[in-house]
Image: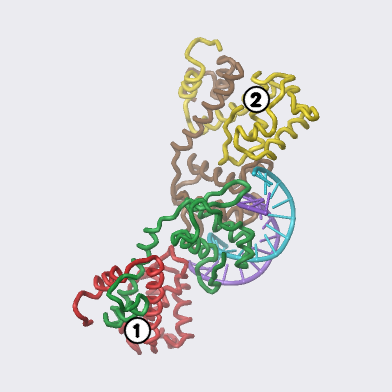
Chain colours: A yellow, B brown, C red, D green, E purple, F cyan
Amino acid sequence: MWFYIDYSSHVPIYQQIKEKIKEMIAKGEIKEGDFVPSIRVLAKDIGVNVNTIARAYRELAMEGVLKVVRGEGYIVISVDKATFINKYIETLRKILGKLKEYNVSKKDVIKVVEEVFGRGEDDS
Amino acid sequence: MWFYIDYSSHVPIYQQIKEKIKEMIAKGEIKEGDFVPSIRVLAKDIGVNVNTIARAYRELAMEGVLKVVRGEGYIVISVDKATFINKYIETLRKILGKLKEYNVSKKDVIKVVEEVFGRGEDDS
Amino acid sequence: MWFYIDYSSHVPIYQQIKEKIKEMIAKGEIKEGDFVPSIRVLAKDIGVNVNTIARAYRELAMEGVLKVVRGEGYIVISVDKATFINKYIETLRKILGKLKEYNVSKKDVIKVVEEVFGRGEDDS
Amino acid sequence: MWFYIDYSSHVPIYQQIKEKIKEMIAKGEIKEGDFVPSIRVLAKDIGVNVNTIARAYRELAMEGVLKVVRGEGYIVISVDKATFINKYIETLRKILGKLKEYNVSKKDVIKVVEEVFGRGEDDS
DNA sequence: GTGGTCTAGACCACG
DNA sequence: GTGGTCTAGACCACT
């Protein structure tokens, strides 16, 4: 591991880390039963304080995403993928609303969609 | 003036206010040369402390969006609308990227776009 | 009248005006017994509020620089020129001290003096 | 750290503090990478409110003079020494102009210069 | 321990 | 009436 922290954001670092970890699980990059990296290792990898990682893991454990195994570390329990997707769809809807308010045309929006998803009839 | 403050957000209130005002200017709801509501009035309207509004206005003035007129209040100078739209397009691109990573189909995305923009060939 | 107000300064406008008037008297541009411009006229001339001028004149009257003549206006009483010069000499001393702290050489300072006063042995 | 605040000045305290800190950096009394005193410590030292120091530091950070390190404090980035000196030279020129207007002789001015810089041919 | 935000309220300066 | 500064103190987030 891995990942970019936005220090200029108002979102606290431990929260950014929580999100990232949930995402990795949702996307299958880490699997149920796997150990996540140890607090110290992850702290070093991404250059933040140990307490910050500790807090992220602790809260993920409270949410039932991780489970602490005494003396061994944290293992992945689960994460609800559907919730994630819905959250993103919701954000999409909101941003589209904004763009509409600013009179950005549907055509321009579709163009962006095709830049990301490709021009084919569909797939992906 | 009105507007909704998200107190549970990590984004500080004064920031939310700054954003809202920039948006209102960008959308033409407040025009160049207009006075924005006085600090005390806006503070009362949205139920936050005077200092919080003062900070928002002060920073907007530092950014060249507002200009303080001694003993009179703050008037609108300008705001770059294009910057705003680009910011939103960028966010759109990011969120579409996320959705693609989660294997949401282009078809489903287009469906959301049409929910917001309507099904017509284009415009909106 | 006449003069430039620095709106970006922290020094209040009425104080800037007081200074300017004292200076004009000290320099002999307005003489004892002269009327200063009426509050309204001066306010219009320099584009500030009537109350601001009123305050400047009122305080100058309290300091004995002006004298109010009911129904006629304010006339010049006096101003202590020596005090002014001493004030400026004091400022000069302070600023020279600063420049010395920054290791600006005496030669460079003298150069500035000669730019202002001319290169001749002396005069003025 | 120390320094003297002029409470009778029209210049706001947070401004005075900003100036003082910029000066200390310009003079090399604080160096790049150094931490400035913590907000609370400095506030206590000079007997002003925490918020006042916070504002000074925040604005210095916005100006690129300081940089905030989350949970650690503010470190010095830079300050343009030349800008400072030019500012003082400019003030010198202005004050000399005033003195000339009051018919203070060049000789008297030079006398003050020599009081500050010494009588030697040059250097210092 | 650090900084950040916010509040409530005071007092000043300007129009 | 406007904005500006400052205080005292609370509470939060991060190391």
C95 in relation to B84, above or below: below
The residue labelled by disc 1 is C26
Q: Residue at x 62, y 26 (%)?
A: A88
Q: Position of residue B10 (x, y in %)?
A: 64, 41
Number of disc labels: 2
A40 in relation to D109, above or below: above
Label 2 sits on a secondary structure element that is helix
The residue labelled by disc 2 is A23
Q: Position of residue D89 (x, y in %)?
A: 34, 66
Residue type (three-letter) at the residue carrying disc 1: Ala
Q: Position of residue A76 (x, y in %)?
A: 73, 23
Tag 1 subunit: C
In this orientation, which residue lies closer to the viewer: B35 or D110? Answer: D110
Q: Is residue A89 left or right of residue D93?
A: right
Q: Is residue B34 visible?
A: no
In this orientation, which residue lies closer to the viewer: A113 or C117? Answer: C117
C44 in relation to D64, above or below: below
Q: The C terminus of chain C is located in which quarter?
A: bottom left
B11 in relation to A91, above or below: below
Q: Are marks 2 and 1 in contact (CB under 8 Å)?
A: no
Q: Is residue D26 left or right of residue B37?
A: left
Q: Residue at x 61, y 59 (%)?
A: D51
Label 1 sits on a secondary structure element that is helix
Q: CA distance from mark 2 to mark 1?
A: 76 Å
Q: Residue furthest left?
A: C120
In this orientation, which residue lies closer to the viewer: B70 or C80? Answer: C80
Judge the density around disc 2: few (<14), some (14-19), many (≥20) Cα neighbours within 10 Å: some
Residue type (three-letter) at the residue carrying disc 2: Glu
Residue A52, disc: none
Tag 2 subunit: A
Q: Residue at x 51, y 53 (%)?
A: D76
